[in-house]
Amino acid sequence: MPDLTFELVDEATVDDIPHPAQPGARCQTCDYWERIDGGREAPEADAAGAEARAALKRRRLLAGRAVSGSYAMLAYRTDSVQRLAIGYAQFGPLSAYPRAQSIRDRYPELPDSPAPWIITCLQVSPDVDDRAGVGAELLEAVCAELDGRGIIAVEAYPEGDRDAWLPSPGPSGVYETAGFERGAGDDRFPVYRRELTGETDANAWSGLLRASAPSDEGDDWPLPMPPKRDPDDLFRLPAKKPKRPNPFGDD
């Protein structure tokens, strides 16, 4: 097993996402889960709108960061020579993935509340020796991250296939290794679910707030900074104005 580290995706690491098993797909432009009619195929580099599609995917992965955190995580293999991203997981609230919602609607036996978060994609580079082991460790890291955010349950919808890594959610056996249980469905279209503690990690939220803090420059602050004054003035009461004399007397 290689030495693994796990990091949430941000602007600097989104291009590190490894190629998925699906031929012709590219995680940096895929909108399969974000739209019912979305696709996994990557546009040609010189195609009209290719750059805009990549920018849209980037925004989607980082959309919830200021509220609940990034929607993706990378697994890095590190040694004395290099640091290489070998695994990728995408996840988020059910409301962020219309296709996942349409799949879940087929299984009325699943709990209605609270709405789970969904792991839509789990991919590990095919040249990794213990592909399933890396995938299970990545799932454990994702669940630990979501548990710290106060999430109650996580679900995934892997698909039965001769090449178990070909569908974007990855193999069902990897979810079982990571403590997920089948909550509904059959061998072809199972639903795997893992209950979390839902106990919010204050340190995790502190890190999230630091990661999502706006720049000191520009107009990104939610409150305007007073020009050429002490920023702490925002938290001080205004000075009392002198009272005007009462023309009718003080009595």
Image (cartoon, grey):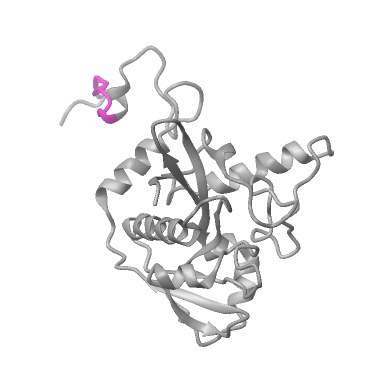
Q: Is residue 93 above or below residue 214?
A: below
The residue under the point 25% across, 24% down is 246
Is 18 on the left-hand or right-hand side of 196?
A: right
- Part of the protein shown in magenta: 235-245
* Closer-to-camera residue (181/208): 181
Instruction: Give the residue at the far top of this rendering.
Output: 228
Could you tell me how many numbered marks the image carries?
Answer: 0
Is 221 placed left or right of 38 in the picture?
Answer: left
Image coords of residue 112 (percent x, y): 47, 79
Residue ID at (41%, 15%): 227
- Viewer-proximal residue among 76 and 227: 76
Rendering quarter of residue 154: bottom left
Task: Estimate the x, y position of residue 35 in percent, counting from the top left.
Answer: 69, 60
Q: Quadrant of the C terminus?
A: top left
Corner quadrant of residue 122? bottom right
Percent across and percent down for residue 160 are: 62, 75
Residue 177 vs 68, above or below: the answer is below
Position of residue 65 measured from the top left corner of the image (x, y, whole percent)? 46, 45
211 sits left or right of 21 in the view: left
Q: Is residue 67 visible?
A: yes
The structure residue drawn at horizontal position 71% and vertical position 52%, both measured from the top left corner, is 25
Q: Residue at x 68, y 48 (%)?
A: 26
- Please tell me which residue lies in front, 242 or 62: 62
- What secondary structure is the magenta-colored segment mainly? loop
**In the image, farthest residue toward the left:** 251
Residue 4 or 54: which is nearer the viewer?
4
Question: Magenta segment: does it hold 248?
Answer: no
User: Is any atom of residue 114 visible in this view?
Assistant: no
